[in-house]
Amino acid sequence: MLQRIEIVKYLLSVSKVKEGADALNKMGLIALEVLNHHPKDLKSFTIQNIFMDACAVRTTKKNNLSPSLEIVVGHQDSAKRKRSSKKRWKKWLKYLRYKGDWLEETRGALMVVATVITTITFQPAINPVGGVLQPNVNDTYGWKYDLNSTCMAGNSVLACDFNHNYGFLMFMIYNTVSFTASLCVVFLLISGFPLKNKVCMCLLTFAMCTSLTFLALAYLSALSVLIPYTFFDGFAYNATLVISGCVQLSLMVVVSMVLLIHTIRLLAWLVVKIRKFTLYIQRRQ
């Protein structure tokens, strides 16, 4: 404490330091007011007298008390707001953080789902919707044969039907996209490629969402092709539109929610990693 007294005397002996003795800190306090918050003893009274002799006291009583208290209260409120915002941010990060051995669990779930979708989407290629043309069958009642096509036995009936060939084409496109996406996921999972990373697993999850989306679109295309327009006295097409619209809307909502959750998780993980990397670079410098 004696060394502090000597240091205070020396600093106040410098004219520039003495002129700034009544300067305010970030909390709006001068040096003498900061000293009032410390435990009272003989040495602290000695330092207080030194400051008073140096005229490091505010000129008016109004400026000595009221503004400093208001600034202190404002500073404390801002600090509380910062702490509360940090707590909310940490709470969200804790909620979005992957728990347990999620990499292995997600890897296994993706493997099962991708295998099932690959099997489902492979079947329409060898057993198309609506069946195939049989040999020695010339009865074309109920469907309009496309004269420009060269349909043979074993070809898809709907592909040769002039009224349904476009719908069948869309069904095969959706089915092929779903098959390709799920097959790529299966290949990456069994190839031994290092996928134990959050970014890779999130990309695989997005691929599976794409596969499921096109699988649902293929289902809707098959539904619109197989139901005849004259069913239920001509109201089947409207019913098909209602069913298709409900399925598409529910599909869009579910897929959007899943993609949004995984996107937020991925962004939160990237923010944490970038922040840690930035702090590491700053320490190195």
Image (cartoon, rainbow, N blue to C red):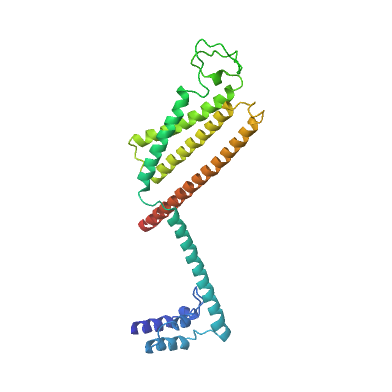
Residue 250: give x, y in percent of width and height.
56, 42
Front residue (pair 221, 43): 221
Residue 8: give x, y in percent of width and height.
40, 82
Front residue (pair 93, 229): 229
The tally of labels here is 0
Front residue (pair 75, 232): 232
Which residue occupies 55% across, 77% down? 70
**Relative to 18, does residue 144 appear above or below in the rendering?**
above
Q: Residue furthest left?
A: 192
Residue 100: give x, y in percent of width and height.
36, 51
Q: Residue furthest front?
A: 232
**Relative to 214, does residue 23 appear above or below in the rendering?**
below
Q: Is residue 233 left or right of residue 30?
A: right
Q: Residue furthest top?
A: 136
Which residue occupies 45% across, 48% down? 266
The quarter of the displayed image where residue 236 is located: top right
**Relative to 76, does residue 216 appear above or below in the rendering?**
above
Residue 72: give x, y in percent of width and height.
51, 76
The quarter of the displayed image where residue 144 is located: top right
Mark yes or no: residue 60 visible: no
Which residue occupies 56% across, 30% down? 223
Front residue (pair 274, 53): 274
Viewport quadrant of the C terminus = bottom left
Viewport quadrant of the N terminus = bottom left
Mark yes or no: residue 44 visible: yes
